[in-house]
């Protein structure tokens, strides 16, 4: 079906929600949609329904009343959710028991090497986007692992492997194709709609549904990259090297993510994911101290950004039963912070086992960056050059969806314990913003949008006076 018709149905659906005077049940909404769009509305038992509802993790998937890949119908006002790549770790953020909207047909990837831009649909994935840029020897700022949808990253923030060079993904957006809550289509740029541009940079689905993004691209697709695995016998040396790297390295082409994990069925592990954005064949000087430490395995070599994601993180393409994640705001990583990470990860897994849960593993990824906010734009996601916070990524995998609340509480508690040490070390504050693409549900909105809440509220009153987007989940701006 043509892209223009997809837009038409999507716009008519939102317009109907906006115009409706009273709530309809999800069942009634689904039936009305099915009457108007026979063959495009799917119900339990069909393969399309299963695919549309499916998320990366079963723990963030819900059984909707029906699903739609394209939309339309008057007088429908029911809870709904919009799914792009489906990697949200929080249930109800892109899932619902009401009407599940799948944007799987909005998956366009259109490079333009002449203007150094890339047009992306929200359900395209970042590994696909990087691969599409390879023939043109270009890269973009986006997700660090494969399988992650474009939409969530570009509406939330976007820390990536070339962030120290080119900033966050949201700071590289040039325009948005947006269906407003009243069904109007508009192309948003900083020049044409500055307040909407502000709201869409980190404001998620509060102001409508984005069907396309146009972002900047940058030269050079080759990277020296890979994963180095260490024995726990040398963990003190690894921590010392990471602290030195965090405080002293100045090479903006370098990216390093140190991952410590513990599991229910294997010994703890520590590994460093390295990425140097240049066509070098030897070990970059910035990594020399870390790589002087004896390693169990080292896969680093000259490759492309797209291949690096598949080689080092290919397992993340596999769906998971249970997945929880959170963020710890940290500026620099000291040895005491890293030892706290080790202790809390170990303790969390041990307690979850003792409590009889289905935990598989817990991990923390520490990523020292120089200046992730190198070119900050006016954004709903607060990221000032005055405080260059990096979000340590905390995550748990587990086997039983019934453990979802337990794991969400566990990840919140042990993240706070690690942050206490970071605060004592002087490299975090209780009011530091939490990266919204990682933050666990229930995080106070003040730690997501900071001082931007009132400005976002004022914008919502203009853009969505009937609170259509309030029928969805996520980090909702109050009306």
Image (cartoon, rainbow, N blue to C red):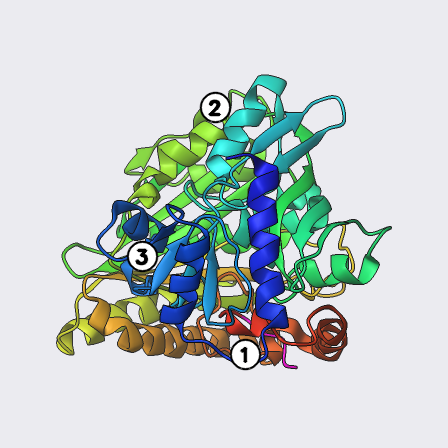
Q: Secondary structure at mark 3?
A: loop
- Distance from Cα at disc 1 to Cα at disc 2: 40 Å
* Foreground label between 1 and 2: 2
Q: Position of residue 246 (x, y in %)?
A: 57, 54
Q: Splitting the image into 4 quarters, where does residue 430 fall? A: bottom right
Q: Position of residue 187 (x, y in %)?
A: 75, 48
Q: Splitting the image into 4 quarters, where does residue 220 fall? A: top right
Q: Residue at x 42, y 73 (%)?
A: 415
Which mark is on residue 57?
Answer: 3
Q: Which residue is mark 1?
A: 424
Q: Which residue is mark 2?
A: 303
Mark 3 vs 1, N-terminal side: 3
Q: Nearer the viewer, residue 202 or 245?
A: 202
Mark 1 vs 2, N-terminal side: 2
Q: Nearer the viewer, residue 318 or 180?
A: 180
Q: Which residues are magenta?
A: 475-479
């Amino acid at each position: 079906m043509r892209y223009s018709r997809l837009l038409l149905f999507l716009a008519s659906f939102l317009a109907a929600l906006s115009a409706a005077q009273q709530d309809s049940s999800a069942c009634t909404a689904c039936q009305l949609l099915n009457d108007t769009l026979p063959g495009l509305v799917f119900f339990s038992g069909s393969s399309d329904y299963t695919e549309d509802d499916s998320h990366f993790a079963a723990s963030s998937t819900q059984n909707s009343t029906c699903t739609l890949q394209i939309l339309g119908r008057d007088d429908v006002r029911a809870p709904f959710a919009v799914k792009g790549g489906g990697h949200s770790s929080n249930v109800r953020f892109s899932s619902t028991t009401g009407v599940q909207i799948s944007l799987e047909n909005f998956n366009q990837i259109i490079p333009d090497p002449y203007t150094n831009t890339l047009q992306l649909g929200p359900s395209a994935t970042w590994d696909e986007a990087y691969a599409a840029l390879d023939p043109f020897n270009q890269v973009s700022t986006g997700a660090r692992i494969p399988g992650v949808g474009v939409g969530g990253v570009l509406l939330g923030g976007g820390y990536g492997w070339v962030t120290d060079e080119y900033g966050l993904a949201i700071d590289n957006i040039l325009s948005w194709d947006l269906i407003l809550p009243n069904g109007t289509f508009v192309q948003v740029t900083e020049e044409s709609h500055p307040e909407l541009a502000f709201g869409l940079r980190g404001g998620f689905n509060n102001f409508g549904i984005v069907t396309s993004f146009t972002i900047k691209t940058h030269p050079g697709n080759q990277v020296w990259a890979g994963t180095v695995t260490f024995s726990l016998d040398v963990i003190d040396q690894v921590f010392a090297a990471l602290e030195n790297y965090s405080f002293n390295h100045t090479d903006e082409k370098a990216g390093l993510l140190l991952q410590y994990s513990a599991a229910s069925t294997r010994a703890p592990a520590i590994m460093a994911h390295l990425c140097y954005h240049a066509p070098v064949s030897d070990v970059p000087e910035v990594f020399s101290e870390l790589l002087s430490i004896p390693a169990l395995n080292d896969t680093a070599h000259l490759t492309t950004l797209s291949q690096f994601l598949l080689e080092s993180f290919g397992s993340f393409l596999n769906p998971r039963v249970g997945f929880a994640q959170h963020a710890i705001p940290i500026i620099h990583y000291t040895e005491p912070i890293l030892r706290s990470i080790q202790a809390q990860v170990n303790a969390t897994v041990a307690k979850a086992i003792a409590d009889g849960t289905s935990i598989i593993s817990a991990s923390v990824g520490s990523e020292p960056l120089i200046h992730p906010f190198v070119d900050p734009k006016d954004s709903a996601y607060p990221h000032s050059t005055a405080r260059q916070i990096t979000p340590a990524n905390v995550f748990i995998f587990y086997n039983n969806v019934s453990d979802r609340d337990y794991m969400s509480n566990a990840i919140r508690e042990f993240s706070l314990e690690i942050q206490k040490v970071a605060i004592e070390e002087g490299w975090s504050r209780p009011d530091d913003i939490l990266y919204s693409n990682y933050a666990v549900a229930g995080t106070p909105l003040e730690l997501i949008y900071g001082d931007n809440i009132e400005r976002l509220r004022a914008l919502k009153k203009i853009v969505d006076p009937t609170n259509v987007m309030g029928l969805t989940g996520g980090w909702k701006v109050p009306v």
